[in-house]
Amino acid sequence: MVSTFHGLELGKRGLSVGQASIATTGQNIANVNTKGYSRQQVNSSASKSVDIWTNSGANSGQLGTGVNLDSITRVRDQFLDQQYRDQSGNLGQWEAKQATLDRLETVINEPSDTGLNSAMDQLWNAWQDLGNEPNNLSAQAVVKERAQAFIEVAQTMDTSMVNLKEDLVQQSQGAISEANEYLKEIADLNTSILRSGSQSNDLRDKRDTAVEGLSKLMSVKIKEEVDGSYSIKLKSTDAELVTKSQFDKIIYTDDSVQNKAYGGKLAGLSQSLEIAEKYHEEFKAVTESFVKANGISATGGIDNPLFVGDSANFNITNITVNDTMKNPKAPSTMESGSETAKQSFRKLVSKLGAESQSSTNAVTNHETTLLATENRRQSVTGVSLDEEMANLIKYQHSFNAAARLVSMTDQILDTIINRMGS
């Protein structure tokens, strides 16, 4: 026979699950705009059935005893999470390169009336005018003025490129520090989750937010252990970064191979430094070629070439115009050498433009892919107000039905206790 209070127990369990479901739905609605929040759900299962025996002692089957509240968990898709993290790292890498190429284009400043190409053309034209009137003092002065303008433009560009490389080193060091902060935060959250001994949904959301920040900086593999902690490895080398409450700091070195192995933004910054160095070297080669084509000597003097500087150890920052020179004349190498330098610079500008456009396209493609992945992920883990309102109505009816069962059982017990027999 079934216990007289069986109906009350059924109703009580139903009320418990219904109340938890309503509270969880309310939590979802309250956090619909909370960044990093994962939709939560109540997991329940039928409680263990009991055998029913007839008065004659025969087993007539089993009777359910209600519902168990098993857990309240986050709704996540690990496959989509890893896809998002991978795409985020790819985007971070390309964004770093694109930012560097944009700055290089700003430094090169071509086409422009105030750029290096214009300065070389103006000096070329000044030489041509002087060649037509060798004794024209005004034309001689213009040559020196145009030479000084070229030096100023070239030195400004050189300084900007040096500053860019220094900025990239500082950005890399800052990104390393940021990554180490994320690693420490994840290890600390592992400890908190293990100590809590429960699902710790809010702590897990914080940990996933930290993981997503880390994944933009570097390419990592995430594994959730049986105890709920995260183990994190570097994707390229399988180096352990986080194990339970322990983490290993990463360091910045001058080794570009090591820095690029990190992946993500860190790899992009390392590649950016190589890109900046490449264009800086090409730029220095152009300026050296142009200066030497127009004449350079180690000391100034009336009969010496237009520029003063060390031709053996050329550095545009140490080049000056020979103000003491009288009756300047274009050297025999001026025409062919200047044209070669200008052609080299045009190739540099063209190559930079093509590389920048390619990088822009890559950033756009990765942004599109990341957005599509995020939309799929949000369809699983994000909060939909329409869905939550529908669930709220469903759980309200479930709670009301369980309450009605308790009320009905109470009436039955009242009849049995107070109205039967004497």
Image: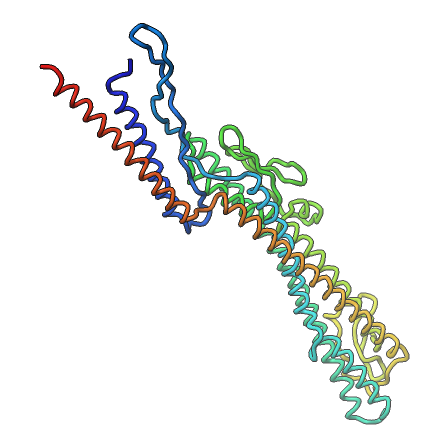
Residue 95 pos. (x, y %): 62, 57
Give me the residue at 20% from left, 26% from top: 410
Residue 315 pos. (x, y %): 76, 68
Quarter of the picture containing the C terminus is top left
113 left or right of 288? left
Name, please, the residue furthest toward the left: 422
Picture quarter containing residue 192? top left
Q: Looking at the image, is 184 positioned above or below residue 352?
A: above
Give me the residue at 86% from left, 85% from top: 329
Q: Looking at the image, is 55 positioned above or below residue 378?
A: above
345 left or right of 34? right
Quarter of the picture containing the N terminus is top left
Q: Nearer the viewer, residue 419 or 5?
A: 419
Give me the residue at 34% from left, 32% from top: 17
- Confirm whether residue 167 shows in the render: yes
Residue 420 pos. (x, y %): 13, 17
Q: Looking at the image, is 310 positioned above or below residue 396?
A: below
Q: Looking at the image, is 344 positioned above or below residue 329?
A: above
273 left or right of 67? right
Picture quarter containing residue 277? bottom right
Q: Nearer the viewer, residue 99 or 156?
A: 99
134 left or right of 55? right
- Confirm whether residue 196 shows in the render: no
